[in-house]
Image (tube, rainbow, N blue to C red):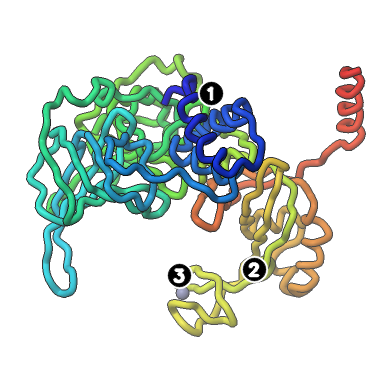
Amino acid sequence: MPVDDLSAHIEDILDVLSEESEKGVSKEELEKELKKFLEYGVPLTQAKQTLIKKFGSGKSIPGPVSTERKVIADLQPNEPNVHLLCRIITVNPKEITVKGENRSIFYGILGDESGTVPFTSWGAFDFEKGDVIEITNAYTREWQGNIQINLGDRVTITKTDNNKLPESAYEPKELKIAELRSGLGTVDVTARIVDVNKREVGVGGETKQVFSGIIGDETGKAQFTSWHNFDLKTDDVVRITGGYVKSWKGIPQLTFDEKAKVKKIDKSKMPKGDIATVHMPLHRLVEKGGALDVKIEGTVIEIREGSGLISRCPECNRALLNEECQIHGKVKGKPDLRVKAILDDGTGSINAILNREITEKLLGISLEEWQKKGNDVLIDELQKRVFASRLLIQGNALGDSFGTTIIAKEAEPVTIDINKEASALLEAVEALR
Ligand SMILES: [Zn+2]
């Protein structure tokens, strides 16, 4: 999405706002805000709606009357009458049972020059992988934070010339790990294999080898799955061209198969030390939804309920409520210790879960000793010593509709040198005079 020419979109926003002639927001300010949204990867239409809401008390851009072609990156949830020109990247049949009746449906991925989107066809679908098709009267739904296209009763699909789609719809985008997210189309990524495992899975009665693990570059880490044996080894530096990205709870997963090009390149091109555990300000983590192996720093602004001594089900490890598991009923629980906290760094806030080992280390007292002292004493101690303290946490962050939660692998207190901070601030102020 070119960020330079936004004037037409700024006019759209001003048109809606001027009807109300309320908050006097300048073009420059709108442009600045719109650019910021786009840089964060917010789709254009959504960014515009958000700005109209912000400056115009709940107005919205009226939906298009005619159904002009829409590019995939601009799709919104619950859009009726969607018109697309796209290529079928994958399509698979599936048998489902609806009200006791067997039905064949089709699902897969569609792509255009702006990105990709999963689709489901609820009726016949006589098209093949690679076909370029024009779709009218489709509709969108949102599922687990991702947009999906539905081809229902009212849809019309026609096969069209391959050259109707711009050339760029076929070119993989060259991206850094931190830029990977769902719906990008095919991507071109150069990264180091941090970890790789082989496993075997049954696909349609056949046993297939799957290779999965973690890849990373200087911008972050992601999970990968390869459905073909490219002989990937830990520490290899590879260029993977033609993979697809899916996200799970904000963590990107790169998937590729025998159709992708995988080339091993000179390891010195990407020194090991460059594979960073990225230190991320909280607003960025919250915007991304989640991330694999990141470092964050923040002040504990709340010790949440559910912290302290708890009991877990010996079968499924769920936390018990009144010695009862929601799956296994009354059981003899295993004792455990944890802290659920909210951290804030001034740019945003996230949930953090600290396990027994980390909690014991932070407070310097073992689980057994806490059992003797009692949970009330423990909670008091957490309020006194951990509340309002600053923590540096490393772990995986997962996002869902309740927000972002980091599962700590490591956590340590950060001591802030108040004198040093104060004199640095003073110096900065002096420099302004
Ligand atoms: Zn259980």
Queried on whether the Cβ of the residue with tag 3 lies below 8 angstroms from ligand 1, the answer reads yes
Looking at the rendered structure, the secondary structure element under dot 1 is helix
Q: Amino acid at mark 1?
A: Asp
State the residue at coordinates (35%, 24%).
173
Q: Is residue 423 visible?
A: yes
Queried on whether the Cβ of the residue with tag 2 lies below 8 angstroms from ligand 1, the answer reads no
Q: For this view, does 239 lie left or right of residue 101?
A: right
Measured in 3D between alpha carbons, the distance from the residue under mark 3 to the one under mark 2, in whole angstroms, is 18 Å
Q: Amino acid at mark 2?
A: Gly
First of labels 3, 1 by sequence position: 1
Q: Nearer the viewer, residue 27 or 290?
A: 27
State the residue at coordinates (48%, 46%).
60
State which mark lies toward you, 3 or 2.
2
Q: For this view, does 36 lie left or right of residue 411?
A: left
State the residue at coordinates (38%, 22%).
174
**Quadrant in which the N terminus is drawn:** top left
Q: Quadrant of residue 417?
A: top right
Q: Nearer the viewer, residue 335 or 161?
A: 161
Q: Is residue 395 visible?
A: no
Where 90 falls versus 311 (above or below)? above
Q: Amino acid at mark 3?
A: Cys
Looking at the rendered structure, the secondary structure element under dot 2 is loop
Q: Which residue is mark 3?
A: 316
